[in-house]
Amino acid sequence: MWKIATAGVTALFVTASPLAYAQTAANAATPSAADWNTLTDIRINVVKAALQLTPDQQKYWPPIEDAIRARAKDRQARFAEMEKRVAELREGNPVEVLHDRDTVDFLQRRADALAQRSADLKKLAAAWEPLYKTLTPDQKQRMAFVTLYVLHEVRNAAEERTEDEED
């Protein structure tokens, strides 16, 4: 049982690693739509494999998958918007960019992005609720393991990215 979860999580990170680490500070290109879709498919398959849903539980899965895909699509759009904004800023003179920055506009953009993330997360939580109530203690434990492992790996990737940018 743990072997399936471990294999799934390992597959996720082996496949996702090139996407996460291929970017450098000098060349921070957003992954293609196909890359995002592949990564989303892998994430969905890992969770499904780890949970080993029963036929009765399968009926609760489609709204969860839709919420995961919607959240991934919105994340992709946010990254594309950030890349566009950074490209615009790089084209200008650094002194002028700093002089002409609009802090209020930045705060409003940030608030909008956080509101979208919040809405996506609430939709995901609402989609998970009916299925979560039917999970066995073993399935809940596997779900917690996958969640904690993914969060740990994301944190490590973020820390490495920060270190790379500082270098």
Image (spheres, grey):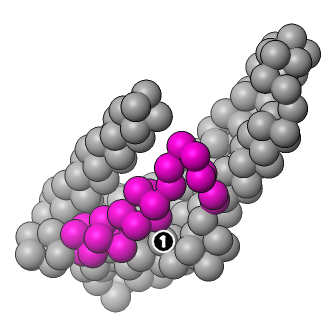
Q: Nearer the viewer, residue 23 or 145?
A: 23
Residue drawn where x is 27% and y is 75% of the image? 11
Q: Position of residue 51 (x, y in %)?
A: 26, 72
Where is residue 156 drawn, in percent x and y?
29, 42
- Point out the image quarter for the N terminus: bottom left
Q: Residues within 10 Å of mark 1 (few under 14, many from 20)?
A: some
Q: Quadrant of residue 132?
A: bottom left
Amino acid type at mark 1? Leu
Residue at image location 78% in from the left, 23% down from the top:
94
Question: Magenta segment: does it hold 147?
Answer: no
Q: Which residues are magenta?
A: 8-30
Does residue 83 lie above or below 113 as drawn? below
Residue lying at the far bottom in this picture: please name it: 55
The residue indicated by pointer 1 is 39
Specify whether 23 is left or right of 89.
left
Q: Secondary structure at mark 1?
A: helix
Q: Is residue 29 above or below residue 56?
A: above
**Could one spot residue 126 in this view of the protein?**
no
Residue 11 lies within the magenta run: yes
Q: Main secondary structure of the magenta part?
A: helix
Residue 145 position in % (x across, y down): 19, 55
Vertical order, 99 against 36 (above or below): above
Q: Quadrant of residue 77?
A: bottom right
